[in-house]
């Protein structure tokens, strides 16, 4: 998600969702995606612009496996950007073919690709070349899309994508027209699995949309036969989401707010050149459902930097302890 799943946020998730399983392995998200990055920009941007775009591709080892998400309608640019992601050490490249943003669609990208299957297929082939998918030193290419543009086109759209053999396909179970205004139709995820099997494809099918928790996601996966689920909005304000013993119900308010401060400082450290207001969208998620939340949230929206955020949080917590 643009301006959401950036490096600071992913590192917070990696830190607070990390746990040791009974078998000694380390648990957390099975795979993490970056926010989507313009392949055209990575190829054509000025040196200054490229530095800013490259900041969207920074990651830590704790986030692995980490997949870079790209968008482009230009095969040459997609191939070059995919090759760059391979060079940077990413574990995979995902192509965004579902974003409904008008500025993205005007470039023939995102959800607009649903209207041009031939272009979409060419972009997948280009990404696979850049990633050297199938070769010893290559990485997989996947696709994230929707069930259709103005209407449900799954029966036609999905086979077109599967014909190019992506490693995985994440299906947001709504059309572009529906945005997120209607409930996600997971019965269409089930149908996607059936189509995949009918075609004899080996592409993994992941469902997306209205998965509110790990249990909810697991139930939806079980009911549809999907290979997994992608969680988006469920992670807002909840870096403990993938931890089996912690969630917003049993994390103390003080811990939640101190993690907000930590997140803010990490944002300033890693993405100091970005507008501080980007960080503020997270405050709406961290600061809710407790007495005084609305007032504290409004106060934080007036902060101009991490130091001011920390000061406001400390004042609030001090007031709580004196009541």
Image (spheres, grey):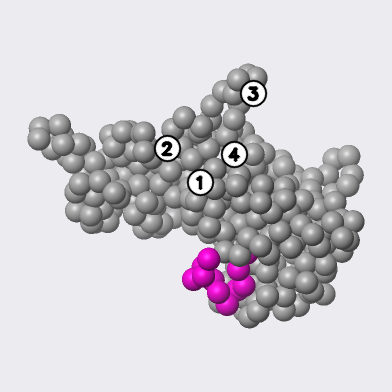
- Where does the image place residue 33, in percent across and percent down from the top left? 62, 49
Q: Residue at x 9, y 35 (%)?
A: 323
- Where does the image place residue 311, in percent across and percent down from the top left? 22, 41
Distance from label 2 to label 4 (Cα)? 15 Å
In this view, the mark in front (2 or 3): 2
In the rendered image, the residue lying farthest to the left is 323
In the rendered image, the residue lying farthest to the front is 223
- Where does the image place residue 122, in percent across and percent down from the top left? 83, 68
Tell me: residue 77, above or below residue 67: below
In this view, the mark in front (1 or 3): 1
- Where does the image place residue 123, in percent across and percent down from the top left? 78, 66
Q: What element carries label 1?
A: loop
- Front residue of 301 and 98: 98
Distance from label 2 to label 3 (Cα)? 21 Å
Distance from label 1 to label 4 (Cα)? 12 Å
The quadrant in which the N terminus is found is bottom right
Q: Which residue carries the number 3 mark?
A: 25
From the viewer's perspective, tell me whether residue 184 is left or right of residue 3: right
Q: Which range of residues does the magenta coloring cover?
A: 173-183
Q: Do the residues under discs 2 and 1 have CB atoms within 8 angstroms?
A: yes
Mark with earlier residue (1, 4): 4
- Front residue of 89 and 200: 200
| Residue 277 in view, yes or no | yes
Query: Which mark, by number, is residue 29?
Result: 4
Q: Which residue carries the number 1 mark?
A: 213
Q: Residue at x 70, y 43 (%)?
A: 90
In this view, the mark in front (2 or 4): 2
């Amino acid at each position: 998600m643009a301006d959401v799943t950036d490096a600071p946020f992913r590192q917070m998730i990696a830190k607070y969702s990390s746990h040791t399983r009974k078998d000694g392995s380390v648990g957390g998200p099975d795979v993490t995606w970056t926010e989507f990055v313009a392949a055209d920009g990575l190829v054509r941007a000025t040196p200054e612009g490229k530095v800013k775009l490259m900041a969207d591709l920074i990651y830590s080892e704790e986030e692995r496996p980490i997949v870079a998400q790209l968008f482009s309608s230009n095969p040459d640019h997609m191939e070059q950007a995919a090759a760059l992601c391979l060079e940077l050490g990413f574990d995979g490249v995902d192509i965004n073919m579902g974003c409904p943003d008008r500025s993205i669609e005007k470039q023939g990208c995102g959800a607009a690709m649903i209207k041009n299957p031939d272009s979409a297929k060419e972009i997948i082939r280009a990404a696979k070349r850049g990633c050297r998918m199938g070769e010893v030193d290559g990485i997989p290419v996947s696709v994230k899309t929707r069930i259709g543009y103005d209407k449900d086109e799954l029966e036609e759209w999905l086979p077109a994508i599967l014909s190019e053999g992506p490693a995985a396909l994440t299906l947001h179970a709504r059309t572009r027209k529906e945005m997120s205004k209607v409930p996600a139709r997971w019965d269409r995820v089930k149908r996607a699995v059936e189509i995949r099997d009918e075609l004899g494809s080996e592409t993994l099918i992941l469902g997306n949309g209205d998965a509110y928790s790990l249990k909810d996601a697991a139930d939806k996966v079980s009911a549809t036969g999907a290979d997994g689920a992608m969680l988006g909005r469920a992670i807002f304000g909840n870096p403990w989401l993938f931890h089996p013993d912690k969630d917003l119900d049993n994390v103390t308010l003080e811990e939640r707010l101190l993690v907000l401060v930590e997140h803010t400082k990490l944002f300033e450290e890693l993405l100091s050149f970005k507008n501080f207001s980007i960080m503020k969208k997270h405050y709406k998620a961290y600061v809710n459902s407790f007495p005084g939340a609305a007032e504290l949230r409004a106060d934080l929206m007036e902060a101009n930097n991490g130091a001011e955020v920390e000061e406001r949080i400390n004042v609030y917590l001090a007031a709580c302890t004196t009541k």
